[in-house]
Amino acid sequence: MARIRSIKPSFWTDPDVAGLRRDARLLVIGLISHADDDGRFLATATAIGGNVFPHDELPPATIRRWRDEVAKAGIIEIYTVDGSDYGHFPNWLKHQKVYKPYPSTLPSPPGWVGVQS
């Protein structure tokens, strides 16, 4: 369940973010706003397109390219469970304060051990 999220001013000058193309930076903000309380999201091109770019006619290959650019920068991690792509922000709790967290309905990243559900 997506909720109101915070974007810190330091987001814009973070070296990992600054190294991304403009569209990939926009994607990061969209993924932050659609991530659940554990920082997880459905990472298929179709889901990202529908959630983050609902009014744009973007080819799935373009969305995957931006997603993979963000993953290569280490901002998100992509993982596959039962043939579906999921993503998560490995530093979610460092940057988001979640009050009354709602347990994720998405599978955990492989090997995930942490305070998140």
Image (cartoon, rainbow, N blue to C red):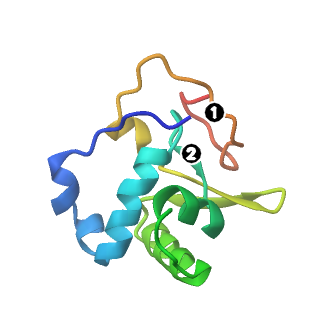
Q: Is residue 94 left or right of residue 3?
A: left
Query: Label 2 crowding class (10 Å Cα cut-off): few <14, some 14-19, many 20+?
Result: many
Q: Nearer the viewer, residue 112 or 14?
A: 14
Give the residue type at disc 2: Arg
Q: Residue at x 56, y 76 (%)?
A: 64
Residue 19, above or below 12: below
Q: Is residue 107 left or right of residue 93?
A: right
Give the residue type at disc 1: Ser
The x and y percentages for residue 16 are 30, 66
Label 2: state its secondary structure. Answer: strand
Q: Name the residue furthest front.
A: 55
Label 1: state its secondary structure. Answer: loop
Is there any visible trace of residue 20 in the rendered image? no
Q: Earlier in the sequence, mark 2 or mark 1?
A: 2
Q: Residue at x 43, y 68 (%)?
A: 70
Q: Nearer the viewer, residue 105 or 91?
A: 105
Residue contact at pointers 2 and 1, CB within 8 angstroms: yes
Q: Residue at x 35, y 74 (%)?
A: 23
Which mark, by number, is residue 33? Answer: none
Residue 31, above or below 46: above
Instruction: Read off the residue under disc 2.
Output: 40
Residue 49, above or below 98: below
The x and y percentages for residue 73 are 40, 69
Q: Which part of the image, by quadrant, shows the N terminus?
A: top right
> How far separated are the C-alphas under marks 2 and 1?
8 Å
Instruction: Read off the residue under disc 1.
Output: 104
The x and y percentages for residue 42 are 63, 53
Q: Name the residue furthest right.
A: 82
